[in-house]
Image (cartoon, grey):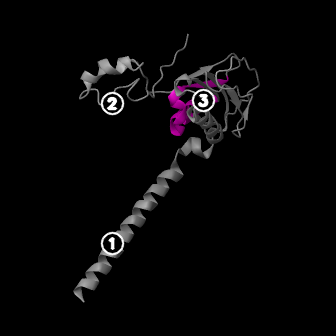
């Protein structure tokens, strides 16, 4: 039976930040509901294949909010994405709704249909355009069925990741440096006069 270890662990609950320095805190994080320091992770994103060889990438909870992380499932052959999550700890707040909205982003970025299963939160289907269908309500006991369509093509985002965001950051740094140098030069000129 194939398996996958959740690999993006929630800091402070599932993963202790700076474990070498904060080892003494591990006892307290266990009391917060996590099992910090003892969860196994894996480097590669596992893709599972069904009988017709369709690859399925399964993101677990917190992993689904990281766009480039999810693209690795697609790069490894996932034609569909599944998200399994426990949104119960959000309570009936906007948090579980926002967590569901990330599924739309992942569907659009990768042009993959998504089946999302959440205990207490929103279970739904998301098509490749990011449209959500058959969304369940908060704390609703429900079974939903639907059709999801596999896709084998890779999008620009899947191939390149947050290229535009990284480019914008570099442009911002260059503009900041240009402004700093220009203002400094102008100040030095005004002092020398």
**Which type of secondary structure does the marked residue at label 2 adopt?**
loop
Where residue 97 sits, quadrant-wise, is: top right
> To which residue does mark 3 refer?
77
Q: Is residue 57 magenta?
A: yes
Q: Dividing the image into 4 quarters, which one contains the C terminus?
A: bottom left
Vertical side of 185 occupied by 47: above or below: above
Q: Is residue 117 magenta?
A: no
Where residue 111 sits, quadrant-wise, is: top right
**How would you rate the neighbour count of disc 1 (Cα within 10 Å): few for under 14, some for 14-19, many for 20 or more?**
few
> To which residue does mark 1 refer?
181
Identify which residue is drawn at 48% across, 55% down.
Answer: 167
Query: Nearer the N terminus, badge 2 or badge 1?
Result: 2
Query: Nearer the N terminus, badge 2 or badge 3?
Result: 2
Residue extending furthest toward the front:
92
Which numbered disc covers residue 17? 2
| Magenta stretch bounds | 54-79
Q: Nearer the viewer, residue 151 or 176?
A: 176
The x, y position of residue 103, in whole percent, is 62, 34
């Amino acid at each position: 039976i194939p398996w996958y270890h959740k690999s993006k662990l929630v800091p402070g609950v599932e993963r202790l930040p700076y474990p070498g320095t904060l080892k003494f805190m591990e006892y307290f994080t266990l009391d917060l509901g996590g099992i910090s320091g003892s969860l196994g992770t894996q480097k590669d994103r596992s893709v599972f294949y069904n009988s017709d060889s369709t690859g399925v990438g399964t993101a677990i909870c917190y992993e689904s909010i990281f766009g480039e992380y999810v693209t690795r499932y697609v790069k490894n052959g996932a034609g569909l994405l599944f998200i399994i999550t426990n949104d119960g700890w959000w309570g009936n707040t906007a948090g579980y709704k926002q967590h569901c909205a990330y599924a739309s982003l992942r569907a659009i970025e990768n042009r993959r249909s998504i089946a999302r299963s959440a205990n207490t939160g929103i279970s739904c289907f998301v098509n490749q355009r990011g449209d959500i269908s058959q969304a369940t309500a908060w704390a609703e006991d429900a079974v939903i069925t639907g059709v999801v369509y596999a896709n084998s093509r890779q999008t620009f985002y899947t191939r390149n990741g947050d290229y535009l965001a990284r480019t914008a950051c570099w442009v911002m740094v260059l503009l900041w440096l240009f402004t700093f140098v220009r203002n400094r030069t102008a100040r030095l000129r005004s002092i020398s006069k």
